[in-house]
Amino acid sequence: MKAVVLSKLISVEALPMAGYSVVSLFSGAGFLDFGFMEHGFDVVWGCELVPYFAQAHNYNLRLRYGEGRRDTIQTADITKVSPDSIPKAAGIIGGPPCQDFSVGNANKPGVAGARGQLVWDYLDKVATVNPDFFLFENVEGLYKIRKNREEALIPLMAQFADLGYEVDFQVLNALDYGIPQDRSRVFLVGVKHAIATALRIHGLPTFEFPQPIYPRAKANFDWIDTWDYGTQVDEEDFIHELVVPYALTVHSAIKDVPTSGLPNHVFFQPRSDKFTVIAEGDDRRKSFKRLHRFRYSPTVAYGNNEVHLHPTEPRRISVREALRLQSVPDWYQFEEGTPLDKMFKMISNGVAFRLAELLADQIKVVLDSYYTLEAQNAVAIIG
């Protein structure tokens, strides 16, 4: 398919790096990693099987943190990586491939599948590195489907506990955290039992998942139904009349993209009459789902190039608009010339950026408290 190109890459000022060291597994294009790196962590080593994912990740490492930044993310099969090649680090973060646990197909093999087996490789790497914490992400089906829960999730948590971790898990929906997208994912966070115990002894909090800004937003708000395509409204006036938080609407994320001059505002060339027929907000279809300006987006997951349709224009949404719906900052860029289908696949596979930031903040509170306590104890002993 041909692409429509409306903007070029822009330069951004490089930022210095410092913080708790992190190993990244199944690194993807880096949405989870950059969420941590922007909030007090430094990814010192990573592994990603797909070359163009790793290339995009490393490109943005240099773009954001300076050209001197080496290629941190290795292109390799994690099952064949020597344990000796993985550096020691304060944390491990990542999400093994999720296809075998997907809710969309009850016949998926689960943990018996080749991709499902990779959860045990994640466990092995935690055992090898022995970090202070880990964060594990996967699809909701890991918990929601009984077979996956009994054969993968529960045994995995038990084995993390055997390694000396206190493990918490929750299913978090990005929508509840102010991101205009219905995206539920399983998160496991483990903190070394010794760290959690030391904090409790001194009356300090251990890890807690971030509190939702809009609890159960999908169910608790009266969302707008479909409109005929081309419906004209005074958008500014309508925003003031909304009975749902504006931050949870597609409009809040993408309204300024076409006129902003931002990079990656590229999209598939329209080739179907359906682009001018399907109602705004008709997103229950198998294909050609159209977003509504004043409602949240369905999960940003674009299989077979079924990218959602723009609410008011006769086209699919652009790469930059999809990045916005994943709450990815505008400094993040794909290199010019990256094929459209690959950009949309990388976006689909990523963690919602803002949620990654919130989780990083909660983990950092734990580490800061613990190492402050350790420093105070060391001073007391010396004294």
Image (tube, rainbow, N blue to C red):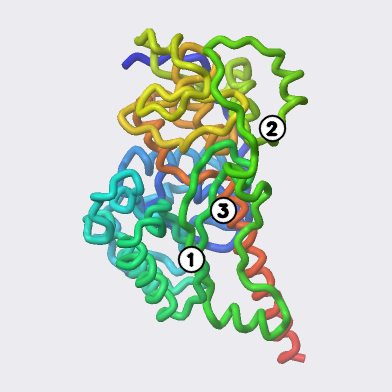
**Kind of residue sitting beneath label 1:** Phe
Mark nearer the N terminus (1 vs 2)? 1
- Of badges 3 and 2, nearer the viewer stands 2
Where is 287 relative to 92, above or below?
above
* Residue 34, image x, y percentages: 54, 47
* Residue 145, image x, y percentages: 35, 57
| SS for callout 1 | strand
**Kind of residue sitting beneath label 2:** Tyr
Residue visible at 59% across and 79% down in the picture: 195
Tag 3 and tag 2, C-beta contact below 8 Å? no
Q: CA distance from mark 3 to mark 2?
A: 26 Å
Of 315 and 366, nearer the camera is 315
Q: Which residue is mark 1?
A: 134
- Could you classify mark 2 by the number of other residues whose Cα lies within 10 Å: few (under 14), some (14-19), or many (20 or more)? some
Of 124 and 111, nearer the camera is 111
Residue visible at 50% across and 30% down in the picture: 322
* Residue 215, image x, y percentages: 64, 50
Of 237 and 251, nearer the camera is 237
Q: Which mark is residue 36?
A: 3
**Residue 338, visible in the rendered structure:** no
Quadrant in the rendering for residue 14: top right
Q: Which residue is mark 2?
A: 246
Quadrant in the rendering for residue 52: top left
- Could you classify mark 1 by the number of other residues whose Cα lies within 10 Å: few (under 14), some (14-19), or many (20 or more)? many
Residue visible at 77% across and 91% down in the picture: 383
Is residue 164 left or right of 200 when viewed as pictured?
left
Mark nearer the N terminus (3 vs 1)? 3
